[in-house]
């Protein structure tokens, strides 16, 4: 089963229907004429679906922000401790990058992720 677009020959109604690939024609629900299956569109189409009509926030922007936040969170939770514990980087480099801080007791502590604003 696949989704196909059918167009009526008399009233020009376009209809998307999930149907077997063997079906080439169906009956129009409004005028009972023949609806023929259209060729699929070539290339991909950009989805610009509006999630909230009041704020006009698009799904695409939200998804990009979520993915960026996930990457940042993963970096600070998994990669920074691995980089600090590897022993490859000097204390100076880790301090400059903000991966570690020195507490009041003079101990080196792995830093937390920067606060979100």
Image (spheres, helix red, strand yellow):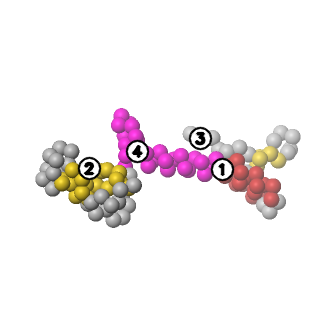
Tell me the crowding category of disc 1: few under 14, some 14 to 19, or many 20 or more residues within 10 angstroms, Cα based: few
Work out whether residue 7 can be spotted: no
Is 37 situated left or right of 71 in this image? left
Q: Residue furthest front?
A: 22
Label 3 sits on residue: 116
Estimate the x, y position of residue 96 in percent, counting from the top left. 72, 54
Which residue, given by chain and number where applicable, does mark 2 sit on? 15
Q: Quadrant of the C terminus?
A: top right
Specify start and end residues of the magenta stretch as a single range: 48-73
At 38% from the left and 61% from the top, the residue drawn is: 44
Q: Secondary structure at mark 1?
A: helix
Q: Residue 82: percent from the left, percent from the top?
A: 76, 55
Image side of residue 83 versus residue 66, left or right: right
Q: Which mark is residue 64?
A: none
Residue at 85%, 45% (x, y): give it: 107
Q: Along the polypeptide, which appears first: circle 4 or circle 1?
A: 4
């Amino acid at each position: 089963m696949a989704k196909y677009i059918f167009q009526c020959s008399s009233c020009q109604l376009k209809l998307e229907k999930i149907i077997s690939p063997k079906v080439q024609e169906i009956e129009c629900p409004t005028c009972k004429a023949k609806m023929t299956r259209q060729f699929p569109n070539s290339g991909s189409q950009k989805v610009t679906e509006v999630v909230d009509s009041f704020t006009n926030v698009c799904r695409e922007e939200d998804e990009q922000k979520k993915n960026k936040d996930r990457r940042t969170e993963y970096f600070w939770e998994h990669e920074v401790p691995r980089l600090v514990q590897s022993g490859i980087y000097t204390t100076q480099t880790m301090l400059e990058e903000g991966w570690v801080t020195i507490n009041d007791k003079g101990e080196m502590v792995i830093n937390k992720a920067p606060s979100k604003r």
